[in-house]
């Protein structure tokens, strides 16, 4: 988090069966498989052909703040009538060049958090020293602090942002005759306390917020501010639109973070976590193992159990079949259908534009049918889940293990196996003989028509 990025998230929603058959013919790979795979960057400055390629392979797109003045491109709906377009927003902090910064800075000083001396609290260091305002931005060698924490508990700030969110999702709100977005994606929504001692100590932020009367912010007060902000934003978006946040988190050292994530989901419709089951990005992405992997997995199993959108994010998104499959198979272990999606850092949108989506993400084509059990940990430490048309195996251990299958199954590449040997940090998605090829049964329940007004 912390980068004003443009995101793409794949997922599905409810529609009529008649509309579904038409959608299947148009959207291509994604609707033929059980899992929904996506990229967390929408390529900037995309042309018509690129938008069409993305629409054919994705079901939900998060567009950057630059789209807020024009609305979602109609081309997506022409190619994929069931696509859901959600707009990126981030209101944890703001600085020069940020949305409404000049107005807020000049007229609403009380919308910022302040330290004990009354100074704004700076967040995130940047190397763009040209952004530094020497009258406002603390600087140290090579860096500049020029983003300032916003008081999420302030009713004036909440009302301002809520109006923006309402405009984004309302037909005719922000763009006159054009339709509004189908929801909002909130970045920088922290279940961890961003102003805790360690963050102040290492210079990530400059101080803890101090409220009127001299009360110093604690984690519980931060969570109260954040929860109230999310509740207000969901009220602005409305029940028929989707509010997702980026920030679900679990930590062995900070057990409250998982609980806080779930508290936020009492109001939000779903969440994302960066570096889920895979650490790093691009060609340097590596699988998480052991209890770290299990903690990530169980965090989003809890999201699914709450009936919320589960859009965990992994960082490869390029030609890395081992790491990609590990992340996608892990998602399939906890897949519940209607609200489970796989979210990739960059990757899928770029691969769609290049015409390589199916080669890079063949897992998106696999139809496993319906799960017949919750995932189980085998004696070897390998995780397993059986489906009506296949099976998923994930090895989060540090060793290599061989698993005997109940009956021969085929790999995604077509090899027929009676046993599978998995190296550490590897997974396999297996298809039962005679399985695959048709859309999963849940497709008819997932495509939305109620958001296409």
Image: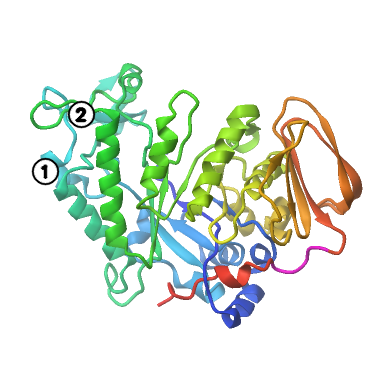
Q: Secondary structure at mark 1?
A: helix
**287 drawn magenta:** no
Q: Is residue 211 above or below residue 224?
A: above
Q: Is residue 200 left or right of residue 282?
A: left
Of residues 35 and 432, which is closer to you in this image?
Answer: 432
Query: 54 above or below 385?
Result: below
The answer to whether residue 384 shows anywhere in this view is yes
- At horizontal 74% and vertical 69% (from top left) the residue drawn is 438
Q: Picture quarter containing residue 86? A: bottom left
From what the image shows, is residue 276 above or below residue 203?
below
Drawn side of residue 318 relative to residue 13, left or right? right
Q: Which stretch appears magenta?
A: 435-439
**Residue 74 sits in which quadrant?**
bottom left
Question: What crowding class fits label 2: few (fewer than 14 Cα within 10 Å), some (14-19), or many (20 or more)?
Answer: many
Q: Residue at x 60, y 37 (%)?
A: 277
Q: Secondary structure at mark 2?
A: loop
Picture residue at 16% right of the left edge, 30% below the top: 114
Q: Is residue 12 left or right of residue 73?
A: right
Q: Which residue is mark 1?
A: 106
User: In which quadrant will I find the N terminus?
Assistant: top left
Whether residue 2 is visible to the viewer of this picture, yes or no, is no
Quadrant where the C terminus lies? bottom left
For disc 2, the marked residue is: 209
Where residue 310 appears, as percent x and y from the top left, is 52, 51
């Amino acid at each position: 988090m912390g980068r004003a990025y443009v995101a793409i998230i794949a997922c599905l929603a409810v529609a009529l069966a008649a509309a579904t058959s038409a959608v299947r013919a148009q959207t291509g790979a994604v609707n033929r498989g059980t899992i929904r795979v996506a990229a967390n960057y929408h390529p900037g400055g995309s042309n018509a052909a690129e938008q069409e390629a993305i629409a054919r392979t994705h079901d939900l797109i998060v567009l950057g703040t630059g789209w807020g003045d024009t609305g979602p491109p109609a081309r997506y709906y022409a190619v994929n009538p069931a696509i859901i377009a959600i707009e990126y927003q981030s209101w944890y902090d703001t600085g020069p060049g940020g949305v409404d910064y000049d107005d807020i800075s000049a007229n609403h000083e009380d919308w910022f958090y302040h330290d004990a001396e009354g100074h704004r609290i700076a967040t995130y260091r940047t190397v763009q020293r040209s952004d530094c305002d020497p009258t406002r931005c603390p600087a140290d060698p090579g860096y500049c602090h020029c983003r300032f924490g916003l008081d999420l508990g302030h009713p004036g700030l909440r009302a301002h942002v809520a109006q923006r969110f309402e405009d984004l999702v309302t037909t005719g709100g922000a763009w006159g005759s054009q339709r509004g977005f189908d929801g909002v994606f909130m970045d920088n929504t922290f279940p961890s306390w961003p102003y805790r001692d360690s963050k102040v100590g290492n210079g990530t932020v400059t101080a803890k917020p101090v409220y009127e009367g001299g009360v110093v912010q604690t984690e519980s007060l931060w969570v109260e501010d954040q929860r109230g902000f999310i509740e207000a934003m969901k009220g602005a978006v409305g029940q028929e639109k989707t509010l997702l946040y980026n920030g679900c988190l679990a930590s062995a050292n900070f057990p409250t973070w998982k609980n806080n994530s779930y508290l936020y989901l009492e109001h939000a419709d779903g969440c994302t976590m960066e570096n889920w089951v895979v650490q790093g990005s691009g060609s340097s992405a590596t699988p998480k193992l052991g209890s770290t992997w299990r903690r990530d997995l169980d965090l989003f199993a809890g999201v699914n159990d709450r009936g919320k959108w589960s859009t965990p994010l992994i960082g490869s998104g390029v030609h890395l079949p081992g790491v990609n499959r590990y992340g996608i198979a892990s998602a399939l272990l906890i897949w519940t259908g209607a609200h489970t999606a796989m979210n990739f850092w960059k990757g899928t949108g770029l691969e769609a534009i290049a015409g390589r989506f199916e080669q890079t993400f063949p897992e998106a084509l696999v139809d496993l049918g319906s799960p017949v059990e919750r995932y189980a940990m085998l004696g070897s430490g390998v995780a397993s889940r059986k489906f009506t048309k296949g099976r998923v195996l994930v090895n989060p251990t540090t060793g290599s293990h061989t698993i005997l299958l109940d009956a021969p199954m085929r790999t995604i590449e077509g090899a027929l196996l009676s046993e599978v040997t998995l190296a550490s940090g590897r997974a396999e998605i297996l298809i039962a003989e005679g399985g695959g090829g048709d859309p999963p049964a849940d497709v008819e329940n997932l495509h939305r028509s109620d958001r296409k007004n």
